[in-house]
Image (cartoon, rainbow, N blue to C red):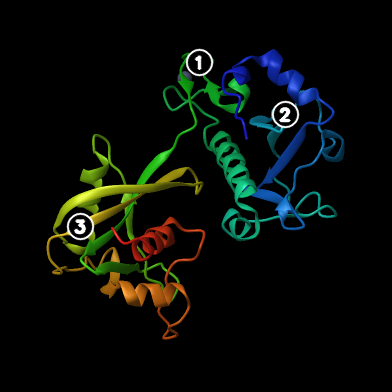
Amino acid sequence: MNRASAERSDPAWVAAQQARADALFLPIWQAKPFLSGGRAGFLSATQLGLNPDQMCAFLGLQDGRPLFAVALPDSQDPPLATLGEFTEMRAAALLLPDAECAIAGQAKSLVDWHHRHRFCANCGAKTLAADSGYRRDCPGCGAQHFPRTDPVVIMLPLLGEECLVGRGARFPEGMYSAFAGFMEPGETLEEAVRRELQEEVALQISSVRYHASQPWPFPSSLMLGCYAEAVSKDFQIDAQEIEQACWMTKAEVRARLAGGIEDGIKLPGTVAIARLLLADWVNTGDK
Ligand SMILES: [Zn+2]
């Protein structure tokens, strides 16, 4: 999808896109995207009964057709029940094709951001949506607010043919995964990885290597997936953050990812970047 970031700052252009007969709108209600038949539930303005100047966030042009996200007002019963259902984003991610999952995540994240930033963080006045949904302006002090993305490091410590996985207290039963934590101001990616591993498992790290990223719209994180080379296998869990940790061999991880070991220990599902870190490590010779 083309996000048309140059064109979308022109209000007349965006209004013209929104008025097009072929424009489609993805409704978001209570932070849940609308799904219909296992697909993203894009609807026309007519199907939604949209008023032409309703504030919508522009998502982009797909094959030339404009797509928007629209927030539906809170109500006790879910709206549009005859056409589909509003689905929590984590569950939607398991159902939707990849490209639609990315668009639904973008829509959910944007709508959520507007909902959480109705007042200026600088002066407290009510803010107004601008720039086709990518900015909020404060009429009180003139501040401009932009959708935020919160970077989170997620890392798999490696030592030779083994990796360290751990489980947080709030994980589903039996689930082990990579370690993760929010980056702090003034930190590099590498420093954040080292700090988090020091805090959570007191593990000494030699080098850190970035691997891949994943938007994680809960509400607005960006997961930065890394490998961390451990100096030794010695670790000590911080009981406040980690319930258990253990080293797993490549062969064991490979078998567990394939579902070949049934002993109650689980690795993350396909939606999580932690699984990609594990799978790419076992499937590629050089990691
Ligand atoms: Zn202000």
Q: Which mark is nearer the camera, 3 or 1? A: 3
Say if 53 sits above or below 269 in the image: above
Left or right: where 62 falls relative to 134: right
Distance CA(mark 2)–CA(mark 1) = 38 Å
Relative image position of residue 92 (x, y in whole percent): 63, 56
Q: Kindly state the secondary structure of the residue where label 3 is placed.
A: strand
Distance CA(mark 3)–CA(mark 1) = 50 Å
- Label 1: which residue? 140
Q: Kindly state the secondary structure of the residue where label 2 is placed.
A: loop
Say if 48 sits above or below 20 in the image: below
Q: Residues within 10 Å of mark 3 (few under 14, many from 20)?
A: some
Location of residue 174 by image quarter: bottom left
Callout 3 amino acid:
Glu
Q: Which numbered tag is attached to residue 212?
A: none
- Front residue of 205/14: it is 205
Q: Residue at x 28, y 41 (%)?
A: 184
Mark 1 residue CB less than 8 A from any atom of ligand 1: yes
**Quadrant that contains the C terminus:** bottom left
Callout 1 amino acid:
Gly
- Label 3: which residue? 229
Q: Residue at x 78, y 31 (%)?
A: 23
Q: Residue at x 82, y 37 (%)?
A: 44
Relative image position of residue 180 (x, y in whole percent): 33, 55
Say if 126 sits above or below 104 in the image: above
| For marks 2 and 1 on the same chain, the one whose residue lies earlier in the sequence | 2
Q: Which mark is nearer the camera, 2 or 1? A: 2
Q: Residues within 10 Å of mark 1 (few under 14, many from 20)?
A: few
- Label 2: which residue? 64
